[in-house]
Image: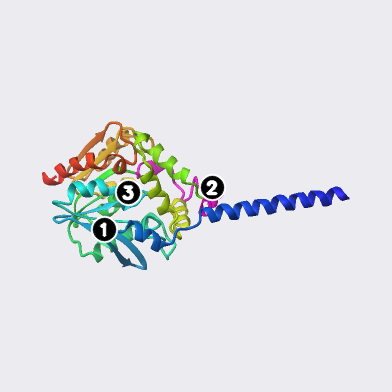
Amino acid sequence: MKWLRYTAWGLGGLLALGTVAFLAAAWAYRDIPAEVLEAKYTTPASRFLNVDGVRIHYRDEGRGPPLVLIHANFGSLLSWDGWVDSLKDEHRILRFDMTGHGLTGPDPSGDYSLERTVELTERFVDALGLTRFVIGGTSLGGTVAMHYAAAHPERVERLILLSPGALEGRSMQRAGRGVPRIANILEYITPRSLARFMLTSRFGDPGKVDDKLIDQWYEMWLREGQRPAILARLRTYSSADLARVTAAVRVPTLILWGEKNPQAPVAQAEELRRMLVNAPEVRVITYPGVGHMAADEAGPVIARDVRTYLDSGG
């Protein structure tokens, strides 16, 4: 039965080689310590605030009426740089990293549901002492902003939605759908090419994606504890009762959308406008050639329209 021994040795050798290869790859794609990323990405405007056990990273810039901004899934507050530069002379801009994103890191509770994210947003603005403000968000952040505005119309002056992901997520009727177990390997092996692919596929003009932006996204993903949090959020996401939420929005709303958005088609902008049946006013502006990651791709251009909207009193 020598052939059995040889087969066993061969399989054992392959297993050993596979294990070594996996360990080598996992080492190559190992976590980046939080303090390393904080040293690189914090600025004088950066702050950290403990909210229900979560150390939230945020930036507080400018003077004037407050505007709270919430970034997209997989991104960070850095996506709003173009807006901040254009608006901070007349507006106080407050932007924060959601749990599992940027410099905030994982939620000790392990809860990354939409409900928990909205709750943390509520507690965050409460901790800052904000009583009346404009709130805006893009993609997942837009969904969070819409939920907040629906629950707190007395505190929201206006709502700004940049390609919110709510309508796109309607097909996800069960949390975790579409995230296979094999995706768990991303907790250990996460190639930089994945960040490049995600960005280029979500820009209207992939040529605008540069190495600085790719590295920014990629390094934030590798923050210690971040990758399991990203997967947990994907697995707990489910579409909400959009008819109920949109009907509860009772504040003036500005909808902004990239016309070359492959993830959430621009036709959804008009659909969302019709769903906001109780908003006193809804404006829609679309942008030719701009994709889903519009804040990163065309931030200053879109911010000019936002400035006009805010300065006009809605």
Mark 2 lies on residue:
180
* Magenta stretch holds residue 178: yes
Residue drawn at point x = 39 percent, y = 41 percent: 199
Q: Which residue is mark 1?
A: 59
Q: Residue at position x 53%, y 51% from top?
A: 189
Amino acid carrying label 2: it is Pro
The residue stretch that appears in magenta: 165-189
Label 2 Cα crowd, 10 Å radius (few <14 / some 14-19 / many 20+): few
- The amino acid type of the residue labelled 3 equals Thr
Q: What residue is disc 3 on?
A: 143
Q: Residues within 10 Å of mark 3 (few under 14, many from 20)?
A: many
Specify the amino acid type for callout 1: Arg
Determine contact: label 2, label 1, CB under 8 Å: no
Q: Which residue occupies the foreground of this view, 274 or 260?
A: 260
Q: Could you tell me residue 145's position as x and y percent?
A: 28, 51
Q: Secondary structure at mark 3?
A: helix
Using the image, determine if residue 230 lies above or below residue 296.
Answer: below
Nearer to the camera, 90 or 155: 90
SS assignment at label 2: loop
Q: Earlier in the sequence, mark 3 or mark 2?
A: 3
Q: CA distance from mark 2 to mark 1?
A: 35 Å
Q: Residue at x 26, y 34 (%)?
A: 287
